[in-house]
Amino acid sequence: MPAISDIVQFFGGQVFGKTFVPEVDLSGKTIIITGANIGLGFEAAKHLARRNVSKLILACRDVKKGEAAKIDILNSIETNTAIEVWEVDLSKYESVVAFGRRVRTELPRLDAFVANAGLERDTLELAEGLELSLTVNVVSTLMSAIAVLPKLKETALEHFTTTTLEFVGSMVHIFGSDKSLEVPEGQSILEALSQPGTDMPGRYNLSKLLEHLCFNQLSEIVCVQQRDAKARVVLNIVNPGWCKSSLGRSKSKGAVEKFFEMFLQRTAEMGGRTLAHGAMVGEQFDGCYLSECQAKPQSTYVRSARGKQTQKRLWKEVVSRIELASPEVAGFVA
């Protein structure tokens, strides 16, 4: 069970919190959003186009759906934004590695990367030897972020500007079962969570907890790497809130969940504001968890000594998998 303070923050933010998009002109900037053909990523893309971002890349598993989203954006708002659709499939490490290489070699600059793509499942399905949501929401999300980090650093230094690496986390990380992470030393946490009979109904919450832990470790590493840098990449992790979207379309829902959805869920447009906000706010929120567009504490477990221990152990495990897929990408955080 999460701490009472975590639950109070969860419901207080969801019910009373406000979201907004900063009044910032993004002319000259290039931004990538993964999973941008639908839901929160799609709404965030529209917000960024309204702020005149010069180049917007919709990174999608299904290019046809990405092209349809591009047309929808251009037809729904007046913008001079150049929109491109790039393929990336987070269920396949090879696709993530190729996508990162394309970003590093083809783009003149990259000002923000929004790691938004994710999925929710309540039945066991494997990808790259792990349960699917662990591969997509944790390993590949981290791999894609690390893979574009050199381009973000290069842009910051060449243009003496602040660039942003944004993870889309979730307030539901407070409900992730930390007990399920108590795997004996010498055994793999991710493999233990991918065995037949593993608890799947709470898997999305758990995957988001793991993402938060990986984000925190990456943020610490990048901070050390940039200690003497004159221009910086800033990192944040954003909670868009509980929103109406297609995220859980493959998941069965009980009566209680459907009841709360009716009264508590935000629109996807409101959630999209938080993603756009996270891509635009800059250094004042470096290393922060942003919920309702303001810095808030992550869960009690994440901040605890136990959580930090798990964070370091999980990091080693995830990076070892990234190294098998691409020693070059793993080397960016060595």
Image (spheres, rainbow, N blue to C red):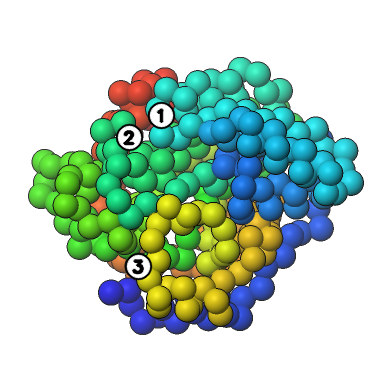
Whether residue 160 appears in this view of the structure is no
The numbered mark, 3 or 1, whose residue comes first in the sequence reads 1
Q: Is residue 187 above or below residue 328?
A: below
Classify residue 190 as left or right of residue 30. left
Residue occupying image coordinates x 35% and y 29%:
322
Q: Which residue is mark 3?
A: 175
In screen coordinates, is 148 left or right of 307? right
Q: Earlier in the sequence, mark 2 or mark 3?
A: 2
Q: Secondary structure at mark 1?
A: loop
Tell me which amino acid carries mark 2. Answer: Ala
The residue to which callout 1 is attached is: 92
Q: x and y percent of residue 205 in the render?
A: 37, 60
- The image shows a total of numbered marks equal to 3
The answer to whether residue 81 is left or right of residue 213 is right
Cβ atoms at labels 2 and 1 below 8 Å apart? yes
How far, Cα to Cα, is label 2 from label 3? 24 Å
State left or right for residue 22 relative to residue 34: right
- Residue 260 visible in the snapshot: yes
Can you give x and y, in whole percent of width and height, for residue 142 in the image?
43, 39
- Which quarter of the rendered picture does the C terminus lie within? top left
Q: Which residue is mark 2?
A: 127
What is the CA distance from the residue labelled 3 to the residue labelled 1?
Answer: 27 Å
Residue at the location (65% across, 19% down)? 106
Q: Residues within 10 Å of mark 2 (few under 14, many from 20)?
A: some
